[in-house]
Image: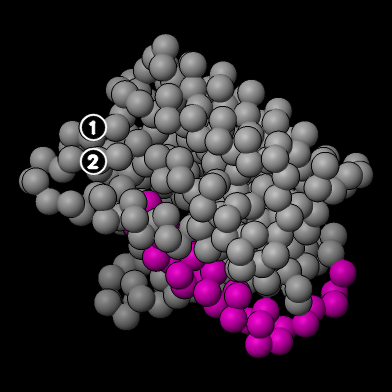
Amino acid sequence: MVFYHKSGNLSIVGVYAVLLAVWSSTWIAIKVGLHGAPPLVGAGLRFLSAGLLLAAFRLACRRPLAVPRPQRRFVAVIALTLFAIPYGLVYAGETQVTAGLAAVLWSTVALFAALYASRLLPDEPLTALKLAGIGAGVCGLVLVFHGGLGLRTGHLAVLAMLGLLAAPACGAYGRVIVRRDGPTLPQTVLLAWSMGLAGLALLAVALVTEPYHVTLDARTLGAIAYLSLIGSVLPFMLLYWLLGKVRAVSAALIDLSLPLVTLLAGWAFYGEALSVSVVAGAVVVVAGLALATADARRVHV
């Protein structure tokens, strides 16, 4: 898979490689953090600390952090759709299913991005290839759900998988909106406020819905710190940059390799069980992603 930049350098390819390496590791890091912190507490601390880090960086550079009034609603929408809702669902879902299965379901973000982009971005129409890819992705999800229930049965597992499918549906909308309206704000301002607000929202919900027992041992704190700095500040700054260079569907190509990489990593390093249906479903989902993004492989910016 090759991406081309008009200047002839490989900067876009490098960003894709970094995002793949980072995001394939975050699913297991979330699992590690859940040993000591409830899901919404862990997600809230992750994004609140990430937002504070970006705000501190902005202020240290003596650059303004204020958001103009016309853009405040946009920041709030990004906080909810790109961070608070999808990652709240991801963290909660990983209490019931494996990290690999969660990553497979999240990879459908590219399919949802294709649907949203066709309505919200005039330069990204819904082509026959995208429709074929979405259809293949749905077939793959049927296999994934079947295999996921085989790994762990019960109504909580079903709810977790449905939530893990709603998460990319919401996150894809946030990505498309960022590509459409994001250039109106500096990336560090948008990310500092949206991550910080998302963290506060998640912690507020956690106070009402989750138990107060939190074990902030070295393993839990290490996971939160890793997810905050390496799993949030770095990749979302790169994603923001990428969304300014390529199509929203092209930016979602990172999710093409993520499911299989995370499935194997979860099995090899975390001892997670695999089923034939989950692996087969992941392959079909990846094939669907490949079809849905086939007309965006050669990127001209």
Outermost residue, top side: 128
Amino acid found under the numbered disc labelled 1: Arg
Was residue 210 drawn as part of the magenta stretch in this picture? no
Circle 1 — which element? loop
The residue located at (35%, 36%) in the rendering is 250
Residue, disc 1: 298
The residue located at (36%, 76%) in the rendering is 57
User: Quarter of the image holding residue 198?
Assistant: bottom right
Q: Which residues are magenta?
A: 211-239
Circle 2 — which element? loop
Q: Is residue 29 above or below residue 17?
A: below
Outermost residue, bottom side: 218
Which of the two residues, 299 or 144, is positioned nearer the viewer here?
A: 144
Dot 2 surroundings within 10 Å: few (below 14), some, or many (20 or more)? some
Query: Mark 2 or mark 1: which comes first in sequence?
Result: 2
Q: Position of residue 261 (x, y in %)?
A: 51, 53
Residue, disc 2: 3
Q: Quadrant of the C terminus?
A: top left
The answer, for residue 175, to whether it is visible in the render is no
Q: Position of residue 79 (x, y in %)?
A: 54, 52
> Are dots 2 and 1 in contact, CB under 8 Å?
yes
User: Quarter of the image holding residue 5?
Assistant: top left
Dot 1 surroundings within 10 Å: few (below 14), some, or many (20 or more)? some
Q: Quadrant of the N terminus?
A: top left
Amino acid found under the numbered disc labelled 2: Phe
Q: Position of residue 223 (x, y in %)?
A: 60, 75
